[in-house]
Image: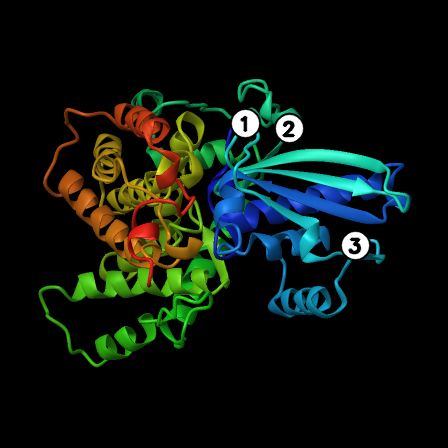
């Protein structure tokens, strides 16, 4: 199946693309299919089973809230804060959900089963839904998998090869960085131009550009909210937001002139990931846990390099091409790959985007993307108390810094030739992720999650 730039960058809510956005979409898909079926009028109760990683860290990632919202017919890209509060209050006080058709059903915490020691066959982030009539007879059962980056597949879809899934036919299909570079050489096209040409299979170019512009506005709005919001993040760790205070200090001009750009890069990333940790509106880029890296590097680019529509679109189109390679050939899921599949991929994407704006050739862009991942290989996902806060927020600042450095090494101090190809590093990331113990893959049963117990 061919991917779109809008598959890699999706507007949603925090704190997790795989544990919040994915379950919300899956719940919505299940309830919509149920209500459209002959069983719809008879449904009296719904039970949700969460497996593996979803069960281990789902409470810290607000998976239960996501299920409530999805069963109520809400979607991550359109749900409002008011609706989230209203649905949560109804559940809390009346133990009910209101289905998209307006019917109220009883729904309690006991209707969500956290099955930590069980996994479904296809992916660690599995969930199963059951619908019953008033007599307790099963009406419909369905399984879904949240496979990272807000992507959801059904049980039936999980058995399909990616090559058999139908979708638009693009003019320049590519499944590897080598193929991407070959197309660029043969057609004298940049990576951004290749992706933009492929987007024409999904929608008119003007619409694609408008949607990319909207993605950047959502990213920039998220940065601005984070820069002006203080307080303590929810979840019990009592993590203090730092972006607003840091922004206020930097705005006075009190900064090391030699490292001012680095300070601004850090505060942009902090702003986004504090918003994400608070459950705010963010752009999945390509995940929520790594949502600060691409926006921070792009904001840095607009402030210190170029700030025009062409540069912003070129950045995001190029970054999406790299994300497509990881999605197709490895995974964007921390439950499969560890944090290398989130922060590592986002770093690689951002490095490529910045390299493109800096005037890098396709070979230099590929080199930047490779450097961005090579030095994130083996990165674990071990969030304390299952919250997307420690080490996740600061980890985005480190990913953004690595991305800028990777782009500079590749474009300003390189000619595109290098020993390790991007395809090789993607293959290595996948192998590393498969070899990594589950303790370090979004279960909070290893690493910092157990060695900082009093945090």
Q: Is residue 127 left or right of residue 306?
A: right
Q: Which of marks 2 and 1 is nearer the N terminus?
A: 1
Instruction: Report the disc number at residue 87.
Output: none
Residues under numbered marks 3 and 2 in contact, where contact means CB atoms less than 8 Å apart: no
Cα distance in 3D space between marks 1 and 3? 29 Å
**Gap in Å between the C-alphas at discs 3 and 2?**
23 Å
- Where residue 357 appears, x then y in whole percent? 27, 47
Identify the residue position indicated by label 2 in the image: 155
Numbered-mark total: 3
Instruction: Please state the horizontal and vertical placement of residue 396, each as a whole percent of the image.
Output: 31, 54
Residue 127 percent coordinates (x, y): 61, 39
Pointer 1: residues within 10 angstroms few (<14), some, or many (20+)?
Answer: some
**Image location (x, y in percent) of residue 283:** 47, 54
Q: Name the residue at 66% across, 49% down.
A: 112
Q: Which of 395 and 63 is in front in this view?
A: 63
Disc 1 designates what residue?
A: 122
| Residue density around tag 2, few if under 14, some if 14–19, many if 20 or more, within 10 Å | some
In this image, 339 relative to 368: left or right?
right
Q: Which colour scheme appears in the figure?
A: rainbow
First reached walking from the N terminus: tag 1 or tag 3: 3
Point out the tag, 3 or 2, that comes first from the N-terminus. Answer: 3
In the rendered image, which residue does mark 3 sit on? 99
* Rendered residue at 63%/65% (across/down): 84
Quarter residue 353 falls in: top left
CB under 8 Å between callouts 2 and 1? yes
Query: Closer to the observer: label 1 or label 3?
Result: 1
Q: Nearer the viewer, residue 138 or 243?
A: 138
Is 31 drawn above or below residue 201 in the view shown?
A: below
């Amino acid at each position: 199946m061919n991917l779109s730039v809008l598959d890699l960058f999706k507007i949603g809510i925090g704190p997790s693309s795989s544990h919040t956005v994915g379950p919300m979409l899956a719940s919505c898909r299940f309830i919509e299919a149920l209500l459209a079926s002959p069983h719809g009028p008879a449904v009296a109760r719904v039970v949700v089973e969460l497996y593996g990683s979803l069960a281990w860290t789902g409470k810290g990632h607000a998976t239960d809230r996501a299920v409530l919202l999805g069963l109520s017919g809400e979607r991550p890209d359109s749900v409002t804060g008011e609706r989230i509060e209203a649905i949560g209050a109804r559940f809390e006080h009346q133990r009910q959900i209101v289905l998209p058709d307006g019917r109220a059903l009883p729904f309690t915490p006991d209707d969500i089963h956290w099955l930590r020691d069980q996994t479904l066959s296809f992916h660690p982030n599995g969930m199963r839904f059951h619908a019953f009539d008033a007599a307790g007879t099963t009406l419909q059962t369905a399984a879904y998998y949240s496979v990272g980056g807000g992507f959801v597949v059904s049980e039936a879809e999980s058995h399909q090869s990616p090559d058999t899934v139908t979708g638009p036919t693009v003019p320049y299909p590519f499944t590897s960085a080598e193929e991407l570079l070959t197309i660029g050489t043969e057609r004298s096209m940049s990576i951004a131009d290749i992706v933009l040409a492929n987007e024409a299979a999904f929608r008119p170019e003007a619409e694609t550009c408008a949607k990319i512009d909207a993605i950047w506005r959502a990213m920039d709005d998220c940065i601005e909210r984070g820069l002006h919001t203080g307080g303590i993040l929810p979840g019990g760790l009592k993590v203090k937001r730092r972006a607003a205070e840091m922004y206020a200090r930097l705005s006075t001009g009190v900064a090391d002139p030699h490292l001012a750009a680095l300070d601004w890069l850090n505060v942009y990333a902090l702003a986004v990931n504090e918003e994400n940790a608070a459950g705010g509106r963010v752009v999945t880029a390509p995940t929520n846990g790594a949502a600060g890296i691409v926006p921070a590097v792009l904001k840095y680019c607009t402030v210190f390099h170029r700030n025009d529509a062409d540069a912003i679109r070129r950045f995001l189109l190029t970054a999406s091409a790299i994300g497509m390679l990881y999605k197709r050939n490895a995974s964007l899921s921390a439950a499969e790959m560890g944090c290398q599949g989130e922060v590592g991929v986002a770093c690689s994407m951002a490095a490529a985007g910045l390299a493109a704006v800096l005037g890098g050739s396709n070979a230099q862009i590929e080199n930047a993307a490779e450097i961005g991942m090579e030095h994130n290989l083996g990165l674990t996902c071990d969030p304390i108390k299952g919250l997307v806060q420690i080490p996740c927020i600061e980890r985005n600042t480190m990913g953004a810094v690595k991305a800028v450095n990777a782009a500079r090494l590749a474009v300003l101090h390189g000619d595109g030739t290098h020993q390790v190809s991007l395809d090789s590093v993607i293959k290595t990331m996948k192998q590393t992720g498969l070899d990594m113990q589950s303790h370090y893959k979004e279960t909070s049963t290893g690493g910092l999650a157990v060695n900082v117990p009093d945090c």
